[in-house]
């Protein structure tokens, strides 16, 4: 546990305020607040955070702070502050509605994939707004069409939007014909050299990550697929870009880690992880994104039995939510292959157990939702992910670390984001209740700050 010297920090805070008064610097002080700093340490009671410009100048127990010229004080008595939340796995090229993944359920006879993509792009400004409204100040888009790089630029110049890190098109061991367009979300690598070419083809857009889709079927040559994955990871490393790998089977996840993968973007779901796998994750210091809720939401939509949290009802896209009901009105003859069945309980048994084993072993666990997939709403979905992480056995403080400090590591922004510390960007959320007692309190949002400025949050939600 961190040892704090209250007298020292009180003095620093007092000096900061006095200097601001003399030098006419503009400071904002969040006062009388309980600070949950994202490191996993004990909360700081009766604390204060001093913000200058876009950054945190000081954080710690409060002193005798008085209003002065150039100093704005926000009295947060009875409230808690956490770092801005980070959803480390989303997809902006998917809306969450029933038409958005024709490779999961093919409804292109009802709505074309091109029409769906056009609709998604038209609604991007309000989609972006849903994240800060939900307390999420940063996201990682884990792969899709090249046009998404424009979203990163748009978000960087939009106050009411999250920071965006992203990967380019997914480099895959399989073709996904249902998603083929002139700007595809997924590109099959036909050989190791082709995989290297696909990595190099993304570099001019400066991706934050290279994403690899490692899907293995029994009829596939695992050795051939492993060579493709290894080549993509090696080329990315040579070019100074980290790799994130979709590998949901224990065998494929091991291959990805041995090849040098930095991030596993989903839980291992086919069976319980073993000691060699845990040793691999730890030796690589790899990040493990659980994405527990995405299977649940597919299952609920396909069974027409969706349940939503209060924040999902308030901040989720109402048009997306309404679309789920349309599935019951589509004749089965119009759905090639019918409506899939999700073996949710079998998958959840393994994913929950694996999360417990890895977290207890000290693996860096990360919160991510896979938002944009059918049923998983952009913005508020992270709060249902938190509930499932708690059901799997994680404590609230651990969940907050997964959604702040560890998620910032996925972005490659640990030095700038993820914890409340001097010199870091002032992205934070003020809450009305204690999130370390009940993680559901993380959705009791009072104010959201990004880049040192409070964001306007519509009180009645977004539509």
Image (tube, grey):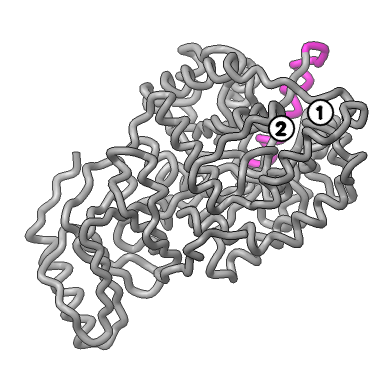
Q: Position of residue 35 (x, y in %)?
A: 25, 53
Position of residue 187 measured from the top left corner of the image (x, y, whole percent): 82, 39
Q: Would you say the residues marked 1 and 2 are in contact, meaning their CB atoms lie under 8 Å apart?
A: yes
Give percent across and percent down for residue 212: 69, 35
- Label 1 residue SS: loop
Residue depicted at x 89% and y 50%: 182
Magenta run includes residue 228: yes
Q: Is residue 226 left or right of residue 344?
A: right
Q: Earlier in the sequence, mark 1 or mark 2?
A: 1
Q: For numbered disc 2, what is the local secondary structure?
A: strand
Residue 52's spot in the image, x, y percent? 33, 73
Quadrant of the frame with the N terminus:
top left
- What residue lies at 61% left-to-right and 37% top-to-bottom? 244
Residue at 42 percent across and 19 percent down: it is: 357
Residue bearing mark 2: 213
Above or below, 43 against 420 in this view is: above
Task: Considering the whole magenta stretch, tell me its main secondary structure.
Answer: helix
Quadrant holding the C terminus: bottom right
Q: Look at the image and say whether residue 460 sits in the magenta stretch.
A: no
User: Is residue 335 rendered to the left or right of residue 52?
Assistant: right
Identify residue for label 1.
174
Q: Is residue 296 visible?
A: yes
Residue 199: in sight, yes or no? no
The magenta stretch spans which residues? 218-237
Q: Is residue 103 left or right of residue 333?
A: left
Mark 2 neighbour class, 10 Å CA radius: few under 14, some 14 to 19, many 20 or more: many
């Amino acid at each position: 546990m961190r040892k704090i010297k209250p007298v020292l920090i009180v003095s620093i805070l007092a000096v900061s305020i006095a200097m601001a008064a003399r030098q006419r610097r503009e400071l904002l002080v969040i006062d009388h607040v309980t600070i949950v700093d994202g490191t996993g340490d004990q909360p700081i009671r009766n604390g204060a955070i001093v913000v200058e410009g876009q950054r945190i100048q000081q954080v710690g127990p409060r002193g005798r702070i008085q209003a002065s010229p150039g100093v704005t004080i926000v009295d947060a008595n009875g409230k808690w502050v956490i770092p801005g939340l980070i959803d480390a796995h989303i997809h902006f090229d998917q809306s969450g509605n029933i038409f958005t993944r024709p490779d999961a359920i093919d409804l292109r006879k009802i709505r074309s994939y091109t029409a769906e993509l056009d609709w998604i792009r038209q609604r991007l400004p309000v989609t972006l707004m849903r994240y800060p409204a939900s307390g999420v100040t940063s996201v990682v888009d884990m792969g899709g069409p090249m046009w998404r790089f424009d979203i990163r630029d748009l978000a960087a110049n939009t106050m009411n939007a999250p920071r965006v890190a992203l990967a380019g098109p997914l480099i895959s061991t399989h073709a996904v014909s249902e998603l083929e367009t002139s700007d595809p979300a997924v590109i099959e690598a036909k050989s190791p050299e082709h995989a290297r070419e696909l990595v190099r083809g993304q570099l001019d857009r400066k991706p934050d990550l290279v994403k690899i889709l490692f899907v293995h079927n029994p009829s596939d040559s695992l050795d051939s697929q492993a060579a493709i994955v290894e080549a993509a990871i090696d080329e990315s490393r040579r070019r100074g870009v980290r790799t994130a790998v979709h590998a949901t089977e224990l065998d494929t996840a091991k291959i990805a880690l041995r090849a040098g993968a930095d991030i596993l973007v989903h839980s291992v779901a086919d069976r319980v992880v073993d000691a060699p796998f845990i040793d691999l994750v730890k030796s690589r210091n790899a990040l493990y994104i659980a994405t527990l809720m995405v299977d649940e939401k597919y299952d609920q939509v396909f069974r027409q039995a969706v349940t939503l949290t209060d924040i999902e009802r308030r901040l989720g896209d109402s048009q997306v939510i309404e679309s789920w009901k349309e599935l019951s009105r589509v004749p089965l003859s119009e759905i090639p292959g019918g409506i899939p069945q999700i073996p949710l309980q079998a998958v959840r048994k393994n994913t929950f157990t694996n999360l417990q084993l890895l977290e207890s072993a000290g693996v860096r666990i990360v919160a991510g939702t896979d938002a944009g997939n059918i049923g998983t709403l952009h913005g508020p979905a992270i709060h249902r992910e938190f509930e499932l992480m708690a059901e799997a056995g994680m404590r609230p403080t651990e969940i907050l670390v997964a959604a702040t400090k560890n998620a910032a590591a996925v972005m490659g922004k640990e030095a700038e984001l993820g914890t409340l510390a001097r010199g870091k960007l002032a992205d934070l959320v003020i809450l009305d209740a204690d999130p370390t007692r009940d993680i559901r309190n993380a959705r009791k949002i009072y104010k959201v700050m990004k880049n040192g400025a409070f964001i306007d949050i519509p009180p009645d939600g977004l539509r």
